[in-house]
C-alpha cells in the first residue's frame, strides 16, 4: 500500500468548471479501477489517498502511469498537474517538504505595517450565512472561503480576478447588499484588494435598452463614460445590469462592449445582473457570455412572502421592537396587497411596510415597544375583517345566493373527501365566470379565509394577478415569474383575473402566455393540496381558454357563474356603502331607488357594464360632491344629501345609465 498525492493548478481547475466533470472527478474512477484507490481527502484541486500497486510496479512507474492518464484527458496536464506516489513511511518527510515549498502560509485578517498597513478585517461569513434565502450566493461565498488558501499558496490572485459573475436576481431581493458582502469577503481574504481603505469599491451601472436611434446611448458609449470617470478600475467590483440585453447578447454591439470591457477591467471583478430566469434561458445566456469571458452563474431564487415576513421581524428586532405572531400575519397580508398591486419590490417593500407599522404604533400606541395586531390594523385594507369569520363575510354580500350555495357544496365535498382513508386531496381549483363587478374577486378573497378556517388551507391569504402579470418581458423570464407567484400563494388562494389573456389561438412562438399556462398547470397539479387557483373572466372568453387547454379544464373541475346584479341589488349595494359611515339625508334613499329603477336594459346589458363597480363609483361620486359642499360651507361631513346625489347622477356615465328616464320628481 502506497500513498498518492495529486495536485492541480487551482486557476487551471477554475477554467474547467464548465466541463461535465472537474479533473479530480475524472481521475478518481480511473485510479479506483486500476489501483483500488481509497480517497483520504478530496478538494477541488487536490486528491490524497492510498493505492495498491501491482506486482513489479514501483512508485515512479505509478507516477508516470497516472500522469499518462491525465494527459489522456488534458494535453496541458504536465504544467498544471503534480503527481506524487510514495511509501507510507515517507509521508512525514513529504509533508515537511511540502511545508517548505508553501512556506508563505496564508492567514486571513493579517494586520500589516508600513505604507501597506490595513485595518483588521472582519470575517463577514456569519452575516452572510444569516441572510434569509440567497442559498446560491451563500454557496459562492463558501467556495471563495475554501479557495482563498490555495489561491494565496500558489500566488494566483490574478487568476481569481479573471473570474466574473452572472447574477440572476430580481429587483428588491438584496443584489446591492450581496455585492457589498462579496467585496467584504474578498477584502477579508485579500483577493486583489491591497489598497489602504476599509472596504473595496463597487460601482453599479444599468445598461440602456437596445435602440435603433443614432442619438441613443449604446453599451460601448456607457462604458466610455465610465472609463472617463475611472481611469483605473483595479480592485473594483463593476456591476452591469444587462436586463434589457438578455435577448441581444449575441449582437455586434454587445460583443464589442465585452471586448473593450475585458481590456479595460482586466484587474477588476465584473458582475452582470439579469432578472431571475428559468434554467434553460439562464444557461443560454451563461454560455454566450462564457464564450467571451470567464463567467460563473449565480441564480438567486426570489424571496417569498414568508421570507419577507422573516426579514421584517428581524428588521423590527434591530430597531428594538417585538412583534406578536398575529401582528406579523397582518404584515404578511400587507405584503400580499403589495404583490396584488404589482408593486412589491422585495426587501424594499418589506422595509416600507415596517415603517408603516412603526408609525401606526407611534401614532396611537406609543407606551411600549411591542407591536400587536389591533395596533396596526389600519395598514392593511382587509385587516378589519379579521374579527369576522369567512362565512359571516360571505353572508353579508348582496345578490350572490346561488354562488354562496355552490361554494358551500364544494367546501363540504372537499372536507368529506379529505377525511377518507385514501388520504388523497381533491382538486378544488375553480373558474369564476361573469361580467366585471359581479363579486368574483371579493368572493375569492373570502373563500381563502373560509378554507383556512375549515382546515383546508394553511394560510388562507389572497393573491390577485391579471393573466398577463404572469408573463415575463424576456425569453426565459415567464416560467420563473409564474412559478414565483405560485410559491407566494402556497397555502392560499391564487386569483387570476382576465385569465383568458394568456391564451392566443395562434402559432406565434413569441407568445409567452402558453409558457405561463404550462408552468401554472404543473404547479396546480403538484400543489393541489396546498393551493387553490381561481381563474376569472367573461363566460365566453373563459370557455375559449378551456377549449384551447384541455389539461387546464381537467384541473379546474368547478365552474361558478356570477350573474349580473338586478336593479334592486345594485341600489342595495349603493345604500349599504353610503350608510356605512354617513347619515342618509331625507329623500336620498327614495331618489336612489328611483334612479336605479330607471336604468335602461341596453346600458346594463353592455359587456363592459361594471355591475357593483357602478354602484361603488356612484357612491364615491356622491361622496365627492358632499365633500365639496362641506369644504365651501365649513361644516363637517356627516351626511349625504339628495342634492349631493342629484349632482352625482348628472355626471357623464351616470347620466347615460338612465338616458331615457323621465325627470325625477324630487329635483
Image (cartoon, helix red, strand yellow):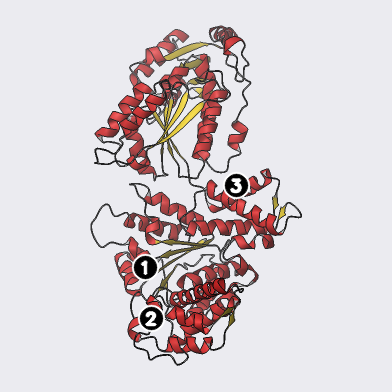
Q: Quadrant of residue 32?
A: top left
Q: Nearer the viewer, mark 3 or mark 1?
A: 3
Q: At 30% across and 35% down in the image, what residue appears?
A: 218
Report how far apart the C-alphas of labels 3 and 1 lie in the structure. 38 Å
Residues tagged 3 and 1 counted as in contact (Cβ below 8 A): no
Q: Earlier along the polypeptide chain: callout 3 or callout 1?
A: 3
Q: At 65% across and 70% down in the image, what residue appears?
A: 387
Q: Is residue 490 visible?
A: no
Report how far apart the C-alphas of labels 1 and 2 lie in the structure. 42 Å
State the residue position of label 3.
311
Q: Categorize mark 3 by other alpha carbons within 10 Å: few (<14), some (14-19), many (20+).
A: many
Front residue of 552 and 119: 119
Q: Point out residue 505 in the picture as x, y percentages from the top left corner.
A: 25, 63
Can you name the residue that lies furthest to the right here?
Answer: 367
Q: Nearer the viewer, mark 1 or mark 2?
A: 2
State the residue position of label 2.
655
State the residue position of label 1.
553
Amino acid at each position: 500500500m502506497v500513498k498518492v498525492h495529486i495536485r492541480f493548478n487551482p486557476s487551471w481547475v477554475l477554467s474547467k468548471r464548465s466541463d461535465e466533470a472537474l479533473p479530480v472527478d475524472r481521475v478518481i474512477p480511473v485510479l479506483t479501477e486500476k489501483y483500488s484507490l481509497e480517497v483520504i481527502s478530496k478538494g477541488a484541486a487536490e486528491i490524497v489517498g492510498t493505492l495498491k500497486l501491482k506486482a513489479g510496479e514501483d512508485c515512479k512507474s505509478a507516477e508516470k502511469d497516472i500522469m499518462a492518464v491525465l494527459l489522456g484527458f488534458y494535453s496541458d496536464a504536465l504544467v498544471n498537474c503534480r503527481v506524487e506516489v510514495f511509501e507510507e513511511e515517507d509521508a512525514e518527510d513529504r509533508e515537511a517538504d511540502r511545508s517548505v515549498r508553501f512556506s508563505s502560509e496564508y492567514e486571513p485578517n493579517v494586520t500589516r505595517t508600513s505604507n501597506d498597513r490595513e485595518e483588521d478585517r472582519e470575517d463577514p461569513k456569519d452575516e452572510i450565512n444569516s441572510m434569509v434565502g440567497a442559498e446560491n450566493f451563500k454557496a459562492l461565498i463558501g467556495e471563495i472561503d475554501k479557495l482563498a488558501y490555495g489561491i494565496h499558496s500558489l500566488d494566483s490572485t490574478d487568476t481569481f480576478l479573471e473570474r466574473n459573475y452572472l447574477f440572476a436576481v430580481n429587483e428588491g431581493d438584496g443584489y446591492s447588499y450581496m455585492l457589498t458582502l462579496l467585496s467584504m469577503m474578498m477584502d477579508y481574504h485579500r483577493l486583489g484588494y491591497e489598497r489602504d481603505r476599509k472596504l473595496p469599491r463597487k460601482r453599479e451601472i444599468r445598461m440602456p435598452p437596445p435602440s435603433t436611434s443614432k442619438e441613443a446611448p449604446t453599451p460601448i458609449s456607457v462604458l466610455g463614460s465610465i472609463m472617463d470617470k475611472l481611469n483605473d478600475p483595479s480592485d473594483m467590483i463593476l456591476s452591469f445590469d444587462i436586463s434589457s440585453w438578455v435577448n441581444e447578447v449575441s449582437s455586434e454591439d454587445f460583443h464589442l462592449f465585452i471586448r473593450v470591457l475585458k481590456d479595460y477591467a482586466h484587474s477588476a471583478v465584473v458582475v452582470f445582473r439579469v432578472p431571475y430566469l428559468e434554467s434553460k434561458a439562464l444557461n443560454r445566456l451563461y454560455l454566450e457570455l462564457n464564450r467571451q469571458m470567464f463567467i460563473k452563474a449565480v441564480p438567486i431564487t426570489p424571496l417569498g412572502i414568508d421570507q419577507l415576513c422573516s426579514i421584517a421581524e428581524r428588521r423590527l428586532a434591530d430597531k428594538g421592537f417585538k412583534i406578536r405572531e398575529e401582528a406579523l400575519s397582518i404584515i404578511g397580508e400587507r405584503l400580499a396587497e403589495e404583490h396584488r398591486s404589482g408593486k412589491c419590490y422585495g426587501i424594499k417593500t418589506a422595509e416600507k411596510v415596517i415603517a408603516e407599522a412603526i408609525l401606526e404604533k407611534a401614532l396611537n400606541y406609543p407606551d411600549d415597544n411591542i407591536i400587536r395586531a389591533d395596533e396596526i390594523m389600519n395598514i392593511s385594507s382587509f385587516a378589519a375583517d379579521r374579527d369576522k369569520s369567512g362565512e359571516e363575510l360571505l353572508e353579508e354580500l348582496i345578490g350572490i345566493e346561488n354562488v354562496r350555495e355552490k361554494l358551500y357544496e364544494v367546501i363540504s365535498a372537499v372536507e368529506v373527501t379529505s377525511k377518507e382513508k385514501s388520504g388523497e386531496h381533491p382538486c378544488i381549483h375553480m373558474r369564476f365566470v361573469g361580467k366585471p363587478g359581479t363579486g368574483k374577486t371579493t368572493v375569492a378573497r373570502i373563500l381563502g379565509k373560509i378554507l383556512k378556517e375549515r382546515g383546508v388551507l394553511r394560510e388562507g391569504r389572497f393573491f390577485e394577478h391579471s393573466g398577463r402579470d404572469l408573463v415575463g418581458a424576456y425569453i426565459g423570464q415567464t416560467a420563473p415569474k409564474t412559478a414565483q407567484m405560485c410559491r407566494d400563494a402556497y397555502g392560499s388562494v391564487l386569483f387570476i383575473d382576465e385569465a383568458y389573456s394568456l391564451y392566443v389561438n395562434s402559432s406565434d412562438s413569441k407568445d409567452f402566455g402558453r409558457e405561463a399556462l404550462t408552468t401554472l398547470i404543473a404547479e396546480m397539479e403538484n400543489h393541489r393540496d396546498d393551493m387553490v387557483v381561481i381563474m376569472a373572466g367573461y363566460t365566453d372568453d373563459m370557455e375559449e381558454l378551456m377549449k384551447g387547454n384541455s389539461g387546464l379544464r381537467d384541473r379546474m373541475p368547478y365552474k361558478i357563474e356570477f350573474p349580473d346584479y338586478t336593479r334592486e341589488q345594485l341600489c342595495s349595494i349603493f345604500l349599504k356603502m353610503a350608510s356605512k359611515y354617513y347619515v342618509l339625508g331625507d329623500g336620498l334613499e327614495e331618489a336612489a331607488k328611483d334612479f336605479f329603477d330607471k336604468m335602461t336594459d341596453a346600458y346594463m346589458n353592455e359587456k363592459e357594464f361594471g355591475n357593483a363597480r357602478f354602484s361603488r363609483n356612484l357612491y364615491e361620486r356622491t361622496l365627492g360632491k358632499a365633500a365639496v359642499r362641506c369644504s365651501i360651507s365649513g361644516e363637517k361631513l356627516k351626511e349625504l344629501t339628495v342634492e349631493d346625489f342629484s349632482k352625482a347622477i348628472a355626471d357623464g356615465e351616470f347620466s347615460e345609465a338612465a338616458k331615457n328616464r323621465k325627470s325625477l320628481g324630487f329635483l
